[in-house]
Structures are given as C-alpha cells and as structure tokens.
Image (cartoon, helix red, strand yellow):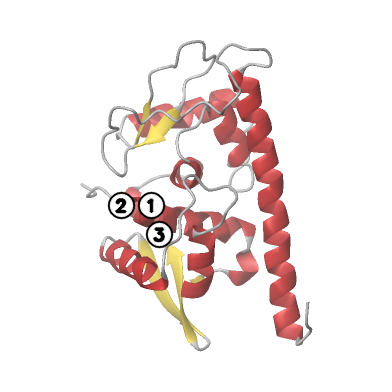
Amino acid sequence: MLPALSLLETRVLGVLIEKQHTVPDSYPLTLNALVSGCNQKTARDPVMEATEAEVQMALDHLKSLSLVMESSGGRVMRYAHNAGKALGLPPQSVALLAVLFLRGPQTPGELRINSDRLHKFGDLLSVEAFLNELAEKPWVRALPRAPGARETRWMHLVSGEPKPGSEPDIPAGVKPGSDPGYSEFSTLQANVDRLQGEVDQLRETVARLCRELGVRS
C-alpha cells in the first residue's frame, strides 16, 4: 500500500508526468527544471515556492517508492516518473491523477480540458469511467456536490482522505447556479489556464533553443 504523499511530493510527480508530454525534448527533467515546474504561477493550485532542497527531498522519497527514476544526462542528474508501472495504472488514469495533483479538485469537464495535452479523452463518459475505476482502488473520491453546483468535483486520495472543508472555494463574484453558472465559469477558466500553460511551454522552448544556440533572447 502506498503511504500518503505530501503536497510537494504529489506536485513533483504531477510535474514529471505533465512535462513528459508537454516538453518531451527536455525530458527527463533536471532538478532546476523540476523546481520551476513546481513553482509555476499558472495551471497550479495551490501556487507554491518550493526550494531545490525541498524538491530534492521529495524526489528522494518518491525514488524510494519506485515512483521516480534517476538518470545521468550530461553534467546533471535527470528525473522521470514511473507512476504507471509503480501504481499499476493505464496512461489515462495517470493523466487524470497528474492533473488532480497539479490543480486540485475538478469536475470531469475540467479534467477533460486540463488533461488534453496528456491524454485526449473522447468524451465525458470516458473521463468518468476512468475516475470510477480510480475510485475503486481507491485513488480518487467524488466530493459532496456544493449547493447549486451542476457537476461533482473529484479529488485525489494519494495524500490521504479528504478533510472537512476540502472543497475549493467558489471564485468571488460567482454564485452557484447563477447565469453563467459556476460550471460554465469553471470550464472557461480551465480553457484560459490551458492556453496560458501552452504559452508558458512555448516560452520555455524558445529559451532553451536560445541557450543551445548561444543567442540572447
């Protein structure tokens, strides 16, 4: 049985899963790149400011659980996740867990949008089917539906059972059941976050190319 992971450990694992798909040319990741991914201001909830030492400690624990693998690449060590094999999960489930690690509780609709670059789900029924399979492990759980909310939000249990008050706050100025409803607002916000994430990834790629070519950006 996997011991409960800390918030930083799930963040590290989520970043490794995400970057495998979004920046494959830079994967496995260096410690510096991993710290940057953990501390991103976009597509992260909560936003954190982890240090290299803290991320290294998280990596060491994840390696002891066979969730992360270390390899030498050039002059620095690089890190890759091993979540699928270690947890016995298919890529679809790994993608959903990664998005939950990175962004906190979400509806199936939000998960489908936010996991698009990790795995393209054909429809919401497919997302819900994999969530239900994960719930049997149990790796995830559906949160009680908030008053007026149209969709159920899901959270991961890799850090343990949910505590009272785990449900995310409703954004200021948005009332459950209002028009547009909270569900529509959440979907719109997820789209904005996804696009911002793509911009951030493009910036990372341009910066890397400039460094390799010796060009100042």
Q: Which residue is mark 3?
A: 82
Q: Residue at x 51, y 45 (%)?
A: 95
Tell me, yes or no, whether the two marked residues, 1 and 2, touch with CB atoms within 8 Å: yes
Q: Position of residue 15 (x, y in %)?
A: 49, 57
Q: Residue at x 76, y 85 (%)?
A: 213
Type of amino acid under label 3:
Asn
SS type, badge 1: helix
Q: Position of residue 185 (x, y in %)?
A: 64, 25
Q: Between residue 47 and residue 87, name the one nearer to us.
A: 47
* Mark 3 / mark 2, whichever is N-terminal: 2
Q: Which of the two discs, 3 and 2, sits closer to the camera?
A: 2
Q: Which of the two discs, 1 and 3, sits closer to the camera?
A: 1
SS type, badge 2: loop
SS type, badge 3: loop
Q: Position of residue 74 (x, y in %)?
A: 53, 87
Name the disc covering residue 205, or none. Answer: none
Q: For the residue carrying disc 2, how many other residues have a C-alpha within 10 Å: few (<14), some (14-19), or many (20+)?
A: few
Type of amino acid under label 1:
Thr
Q: For the residue carrying disc 1, how many other residues have a C-alpha within 10 Å: few (<14), some (14-19), or many (20+)?
A: many
Q: Which residue is mark 1?
A: 10
Type of amino acid under label 2:
Ser
Q: Could you tell me if residue 36 is visible in this image?
A: yes
Tell me, yes or no, whether the two marked residues, 3 and 2, touch with CB atoms within 8 Å: no
Q: For the residue carrying disc 3, how many other residues have a C-alpha within 10 Å: few (<14), some (14-19), or many (20+)?
A: some
Q: Which residue is mark 2?
A: 6
